[in-house]
Image (tube, grey):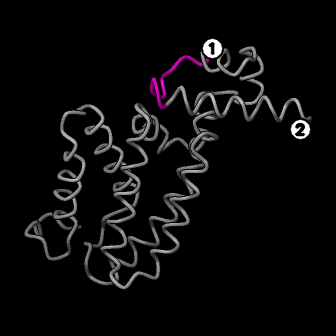
Amino acid sequence: MRADARRNYQRLLCEARAAFAEHGTDTSLEDVARRAGVGIGTLYRHFPTRHALLSAVFEDAVSDLLTRSHALLDAPQPCTALVEWLRAIITHAGEYRGLARALMSASRDDSSALARCSRPMREAGTRLLARAQEAGAVRRGVSIEDLMQLTNAIALAAEESPDDPELADRLLTLTLRGLKADSSTAAYRD
């Protein structure tokens, strides 16, 4: 990439982060380009779709979440490690209005640029979930795909209820009670 193209790319990322934080992930891409001082064609040359831009913007956060998941693989309590990681995902998804919805829509679409973020997250989560299941703390039959959708749904619910800062934690706690291997929902086990 030429030096000017690299500068444009970085400015677009910087301005997209700011615009997404300020107005949500549905912000106008024309506005992002304008804020970066480039034309919309330049934005689309670097990021052909909104999901491609979202993926690039959130790569650092995803990298942090992946690093955290690797560190948690050695945690003495596998279920606690899984819960800590799920909470971190909810926190991340809640940082930008609209991100949880975008992640939910891309979760089953491997052709989406956001799959570049969600695929390694699913792989990392699968390892944490498997440890919790092997320890007998989480029921067999629970999948990481379901957990990722639930965490995004919790983040979305919290986004829609900004006057209730404890909502995400309450919903996650409620969800986790249903995941326990010894839960009273034994009749619903796979």
Q: Amino acid at mark 2?
A: Met
- Magenta span has 29? yes
* Picture layout, residue 42 above or below residue 2: above
The stretch of residues the image draws in magenta is: 21-30
Q: Which structural element holds mark 2?
A: loop
* Picture layout, residue 91 above or below residue 104: below
* Picture layout, residue 43 above or below residue 185: above
Which sits in the foreground, 19 or 138?
19
**Left or right: 156 with respect to 119?**
left
Q: In the image, residue 171 lies at what x, y percent? A: 20, 50
Q: In the image, residue 70 lies at what x, y percent? A: 52, 72
Which sits in the foreground, 18 or 168?
18
Tell me the quarter of the picture where residue 138 sits: bottom left
Mark 2 vs mark 1, CA separation in Å: 23 Å
Tell me the quarter of the picture where residue 88 sits: bottom left
Please tell me which of labels 2 and 1 falls first in the chain: 2
- Residue appearing at x 31%, y 73% in the figure: 80
**Left or right: 172 with respect to 59?**
left
- Residue appearing at x 55%, y 16% in the figure: 28
Q: Amino acid at mark 1?
A: Glu
**Left or right: 154 with respect to 64?**
left
* The C terminus - image quarter: bottom left
| Mark 2 crowd level (few <14, some 14–19, many ≥20, 10 Å Cα) | few
Q: Which mark is residue 175?
A: none
- Residue appearing at x 77%, y 21% in the figure: 42
- Magenta span has 89? no
Q: How many marks?
A: 2
Q: In the image, residue 90 lies at what x, y percent? A: 36, 50
Which residue is label 1 attached to? 30
Q: Which structural element holds mark 1?
A: helix
Q: Which mark is residue 1?
A: 2
